[in-house]
Amino acid sequence: MKHIDILRKLNQRSPEVTEEVIARWGSKELFEFVHNLPRHLPPSGMEQLLELLSITEELRNGHIEEFPAIACEPTPEELEVCAIPEYVQINERFPHIGRRLIQTWGSYAFYMYCGTLFTDTRGGTRRGFPPEILMALTRLARVHEQNHPRLDARRLDIWADVFHDPTKL
C-alpha cells in the first residue's frame, strides 16, 4: 500500500478506524466509510477538522489511484448537495472547497468547515471571496440548516475554540 503515511496519521487518531480502512481497502465500501470519517471521528476543533478532511481526501484519491476499476458511486450527500445551485456556483470557482463541502454535508462538521472559510487562518494573507461566492456560501449554509435542522442546534460558535483553548487568542 503506497499510502502508508496517511494511514499512520489516521492511526494516531484512531487505531480502530484505521483497521476498518485497511479492511475495506480495495472495495467499494471504502468510499462510503471514508466519506463518513467526520462522523466516525468527530473533530474537536477547526484544525482537527481540516486535518481530517485532508486525510479523507488523500485516502479517497489513493484508493482511486490504486483501484481505478472500482466504480465510485455518489453518496446520498453528494447527490443532495450537487443539486443545489449555490453549491454548483461555489464548486465551479473553488473545486477544492466544493469537495470539502460535500465531505461535511449533513454533519456537524459542515458548520465547523464553514467557520474556517469565514475566518482568516492564514495570518492575514487570505484575500477573501468574491461577493457572489460569499453570498452563495451564506445561502448554502441556510439550505443546510433547512435540510438538517437537528444539526443547527449544535452549531459551533466561531469563538468556541478560544473558550476551550485561550492560547488561540
Image: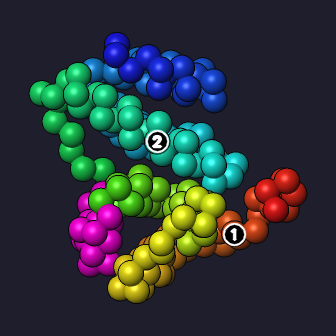
| Residue drawn at x 65%, y 68% as measured from the top left | 155
Q: Position of residue 132 (x, y in %)?
A: 35, 85
Give the image quarter of residue 164. Answer: bottom right
**Type of the residue with mark 2:** Ser
Q: Is residue 53 magenta?
A: no
Q: Give the answer, above or below, for where 161 lies relative to 47.
A: below
| Residue drawn at x 48%, y 45% as measured from the top left | 53
State the predominant SS element of the stretch in magenta.
helix
Q: Position of residue 36 (x, y in %)?
A: 45, 44
Residue 72 falls left or right of residue 163: left
Residue 141 falls left or right of residue 168: left
Name the residue tied to disc 2.
54
Name the residue tied to disc 1.
158
- Looking at the rendering, the stretch of residues picked out in magenta corresponds to 77-94
Give the image quarter of residue 137. Answer: bottom left
Q: Give the answer, above or below, for where 76 lies relative to 56.
A: below
User: Gap between marks 2 and 1, in whole Å?
Assistant: 21 Å
Residue 123 falls left or right of residue 104: right
The front one of 74 and 58 is 58
**Type of the residue with mark 1:** Ile
The front one of 15 and 3 is 3
Q: Position of residue 37 (x, y in %)?
A: 49, 40
Q: Position of residue 5 (x, y in %)?
A: 47, 20
